Amino acid sequence: MTYLVNKHKRDFMIDLNQPPEYQGGKNIIKRLIHLFGVGNRLQLADLLGVTQGTLSTWMTRDSTPYEILIRVHLATGVPMEYLCFGINDDDSIVDLSRFDKSNELSERTTSYSTNKIDLFKIENGELTKQSQNLTSFDFLAIYNINIDDGDYAIQIKNEMLFIDSSENTVTNGRYLISINNSKKIAELRLLPDGNVYYFDDNERYPINTDITKVLGKVTAVLEAV
């Protein structure tokens, strides 16, 4: 399954036409030894299923082991930003030595650059909490989504809609609204006559502000195609 991000004409977090300055070699090895709480490079090589010669190659060529870092990320949830760039390297933000003997992580403490955002579905006009998604703070910041302010995501069919709850003044776009306490996602527009309209299949309907409340705006969309 492939996911596309609707950028809503916003800038990307990095330039896509040139590679960032990934770290490699000694920095990567030191970081992985710290993350997994192993004692030396021999133990790290055994844990990762590579040879000491491979680690030596990383050292001498100052190379970045992208496949290994992706594997660590998928297995543990440690952010790729941290693995590749070492941001907050001295803060001991993640300690993977807390794996038990069955190799299950007893508790993940990924305080760097991630947090959990609530995921809901709309069922019978009500928001029903589904789960929590581990999400990058950098991604959320681009779309002005603030977890502390109660922002969240809504799953509708093949889309995940990120809701900025501070955006409750209608201009133009998709909004989460409540009509007589029944929730739905609606296309709303403020027209030159000063009124807000709900658009559906090229038809428009005036919004009754006495019974309709705007709960937030859809500021980002992840779409499965």
Image (spheres, rainbow, N blue to C red):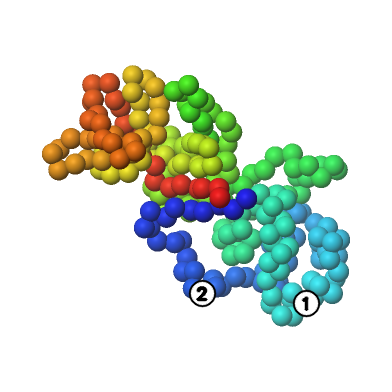
Residue at 73%, 63% (x, y): give it: 68
Residue 11 placement, left or right of 32: left
Question: Which is more N-terminal, label 1 or label 2?
Answer: 2
Residue at 74%, 39% (x, y): give it: 106
Where in the figure is residue 15, as x and y percent of width and height?
A: 46, 69
Please name whichever residue, 147 or 18, is drawn nearer the observer in this view of the structure: 18
Q: Which residue is mark 1?
A: 57
Q: Which residue is mark 2?
A: 18
Q: Of the residues shown, which amino acid type is indicated by label 1?
A: Thr
Q: Secondary structure at mark 1?
A: helix
The part of the image, by quadrant, that contains residue 66 is bottom right
Tell whether label 1 touches label 2 (CB within 8 Å): no
Residue 141 placement, left or right of 19: left
Label 1: few (<14), some (14–19) or many (≥20) C-alpha neighbours in 10 Å = few
Label 2: few (<14), some (14–19) or many (≥20) C-alpha neighbours in 10 Å = few
Q: Secondary structure at mark 2?
A: loop
Residue at 74%, 76% (x, y): give it: 59
Q: Of the residues shown, which amino acid type is indicated by label 2?
A: Gln
- Label number found at residue 115: none
Where in the figure is residue 39, as x and y percent of width and height?
A: 81, 59
Where in the figure is residue 121, as x and y percent of width and height?
A: 51, 31
The part of the image, by quadrant, that contains residue 102 is top right
